[in-house]
Image (cartoon, rainbow, N blue to C red):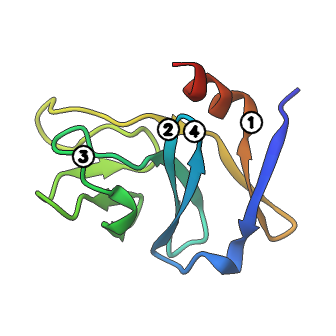
Amino acid sequence: MSDWMDIAALDDVPQRGSRVVKTPGGCVAVFRTAEDEVYALNNSCPHMGGPLSEGIVHGASVTCPLHNWVFSLETGQARGADIGRVDTYPAKVENGRILLDKATLNQRIVA
């Protein structure tokens, strides 16, 4: 059974926007799509550490603000050549609140 952490109201994150959640293991970017789906990814682009939370959200993707690498919000995989990926974390919306899976975040802290 998962233990979920309440991080914000869905309306606190703009559509096609993000919010950063600070953890002891680093920052996690939580994205909201235009369709109100939520995704959580490591906030740091593997290329040059660009803050993905400052990128452009389009569909189920985010474009890094530094060098335009495009990442799938669903898988964390960079689009195009096998140039990298970012970690993803389970996220969901319940009763208008965004929740992140604590167990997965704890694995990030240990790693």
Q: Is residue 101 left or right of residue 83?
A: right
Q: Tag 4: residue type?
A: Tyr
Residue marked by disc 2: 88
Disc 3: CA contacts within 10 A as few (<14), some (14-19) or many (>=20): few
Give me the C-alpha separation between circle 1 and circle 4: 9 Å
Residue marked by disc 3: 49
Give me the C-alpha separation between circle 4 and circle 3: 18 Å
Give me the C-alpha separation between circle 3 and circle 1: 24 Å
Q: Tag 2: residue type?
A: Thr
Tell me which label, 3 or 1, sits earlier in the chain.
Answer: 3
Q: Is residue 4 left or right of residue 105?
A: right
Residue 27, relative to residue 93: is it above or below?
above
Residue marked by disc 4: 89
| Residue 19 in the image, given as x and y percentages of width and height | 54, 66
Residue marked by disc 1: 102
Disc 1: CA contacts within 10 A as few (<14), some (14-19) or many (>=20): some
| Quarter of the figure with residue 7 | bottom right
Give me the C-alpha separation between circle 2 and circle 4: 4 Å
Residue 67, relative to residue 77: is it above or below?
below
Q: Is residue 37 left or right of residue 27?
A: right
Q: Tag 3: residue type?
A: Gly
Please, what secondary structure does the residue beneath circle 4 have? strand
Please, what secondary structure does the residue beneath circle 1 have? helix
| Residue 103 in the image, given as x and y percentages of width and height | 73, 28
Are the residues at dot 2 and dot 3 in contact (C-beta closer than 8 Å)? no
